[in-house]
Image: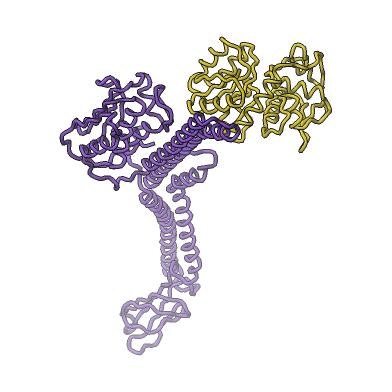
Amino acid sequence: MNVFRHIRSASLRTRVAIASAAAAAAVVAIFTILTSVVLANNDAAQLDRRLDSIVDASMYPEQLQDPRRGVLTTGRSESSGQVVFQRGFQLPKLDPGTATVTVNGVEYRVRTLPVDQEGGVLMSIGIRADSILLSPARIPLYAAVGVGTVLLAAGLGWLLAGPAIRPLRKLTEHTKRLGQGSDDMPEVRGVREAEDLSEAMTAMLSRLAAAQLATTNSLQAAQDFAANAAHELRTPLTAMRADLDTLRIHDLPAEELAEVVQDLSRAQRRVEAIITALGQLASGQLAQAEDRELIDVTDLLDRVARENLRPGGAVEIVVEVEDIGTIWGWPGGLRLAVDNLVRNAITHGEATRIVLNAHREHGTLIITVDDNGRGLPADEHETVLGRFRRGSTAAPGGSGLGLALVAQQAALHGGRIELSDGPLGGLRATLTVSTSPLPPVDSDRA
Amino acid sequence: MVLMVDDDPDVRTSVARGLRHSGFDVRVAATGKEALRLLSNESHDALVLDVQMPELDGVAVVTALRALGNDIPICVLSARDTVNDRIAGLEAGADDYLTKPFDLGELVARLHALLRRSSHSDQPSDTMTVGPLTIDTARRLVFVGGERIELTKREFDLLAVLAENAGVVLSRQRLLELVWGYDFDVDTNVADVFISYLRRKLERDGVPRVIHTVRGIGYVLRDEP
């Protein structure tokens, strides 16, 4: 069967042409046979007439024959023009030669010749000349044959065009059945246009199915995300509600009151952090390729380092890059990613020294964030990148979205984020981004 | 002594502090494993348990405790936010649930009632029969058409109360009072949730309904519809 698939099918135009040629050929053949029969019959009739004439003339020259079939003979004196003799109807006076004349409404072909007899006689001999085929009486018959031929041609065309366009009809039936139980498009073979159309429709259907699946998946993902986000917000709100109820019901001593209020404001900040992170996640999802800008990476690292310095110099943040140049990307997003890594090192790693570095490698730019903090168990290096996932050593109050945001930005910039044990004793975060000036394919964006 | 189990430190601290100020002796645990360890070392009077926890979650803790024959009153903190009677933990044998975030006073009142309730058992020891249903209160066994049905403690208590009052319509408030000891105004549909669990278990093999809803009033156990 595979061999046939590679041979191109005839086009619909060819099929229709073949069908009409076949119909025309059939009509012409029938008509030719019919005409031949008629002509043969006519020849026989003409011969019969001639035989009749000869028989009349030679066997019964003296008898008056049926003037309709007989031979008319009229002799006239050459000098006076008087009729010398006559058989059958009288022929008019004619000059020597051949002429067609009408006698009693019947056409005769008459030949006149001089005969040397009784002082010169002009002899006119006529036989019937009216055609058997071309008689007005046959017009209805011919008209009927003509109409019949046209009808025959139309009928044959109808019959033969059926198979010619059958693949198209099949295609129509398949299309009608779509959505009524069956969702696949059986292949249609035989007509190139129908095959092309069928293939195009199959491709369209599979694209539609893929789009539908993608929509379903993203709806499911959005639902899960909404449920997770609700749960994440509900947790600090539960703590806040309990604290508020405690404050409302009980009269607490000043010291405990301060503690409750402090917990309350921490929970409140946590709600705020979650909402901020949710907004950032959403804007990461909506990042447009045309919003990309040239980013000076050294500048960006310097800025993140400066902004995360704590009063009193509790944390030392070092940027060990001279000038690494620029890359294309979303400046806000990339800074958010590096910023989250530095903040994590301070907040969750309790690091006092953080080293930012960057180098280029095989069309990528690699930013590393090393800290001397308490690190993260190796089996959590992967899991903490998920949304609403926190490390077991994480400080309370996080949104659970910080590293998920880093991962999102890394994917957006055509790269990835990896956590590992760092050389300073704490954690190393390796953020890889593409240096290609073209926007990365955003298949990893989720 | 009440054990408060939640993986979130903020929730753990705040709820435990609130309970402490309300007069409870509170212990805390951050994981299901830790909770089971504490419960096996020392006897506690009630358990406040978060359902959603990593690794050993609330449902697993309830299942483990009930399998060990521990019938400590358990109030689960549910993440329920859909209109669905299936509340993780209750089917495994917890006694009540609260949806986060909840009113601390509500939790305190319910804990007091559950603690009171668990200190005495006042059911008469005899066998009751209603239609295809046989309830042996002494051995705490239920049979439907001669076949034994596994019920959690709270489901059994609810069915026993309905059976003792067979033919009498009991309001939700009355059921909460008789089965849970909630003799105060309480905003919960826990009775309806447990009724739906009971019906699912009792009507499993096409057995006709014995627990009927009296619209606007409550529930009644009787043989005929």
Q: Nearer the viewer, residue A312 or A274?
A: A312
Image quarter hosting the N terminus of chain A: top left
**Residue A184 location (% of width, % of height):** 47, 38
Residue furthest top as drawn: B41
Colour mode of the rendering: by chain
Residue furthest front as drawn: A254
Chain for colour yellow: B
Query: Visible in this render: residue B100?
Result: no
**Residue A264 location (% of width, % of height):** 49, 34
Above or below residue A83? Residue A35 is above
Image quarter hosting the C terminus of chain A: top left
**Residue B161 location (% of width, % of height):** 77, 23
- Residue at figure coordinates x 30%, y 33% from the top left: A310
Across the whole image, how many numbered discs are drawn on residues? 0
- Residue at figure coordinates x 38%, y 47% from the top left: A193
Q: Is residue B33 left or right of residue B44?
A: left
Quadrant in the picture for residue A24? bottom left
- Residue at figure coordinates x 54%, y 26% from the top left: B17
Quadrant in the picture for residue A305? top left
Above or below residue A167? Residue A233 is above
**Residue A34 location (% of width, % of height):** 44, 57
Quadrant in the picture for residue B177? top right
Q: Nearer the viewer, residue A359 or A187?
A: A359
Colour assigned to chain A in the rendering is purple
Above or below residue A78? Residue B18 is above
- Residue at figure coordinates x 78%, y 24% from the top left: B162
Q: Is residue A167 left or right of residue B204?
A: left
Query: Visible in this render: residue A275?
Result: yes
Residue furthest left as drawn: A322
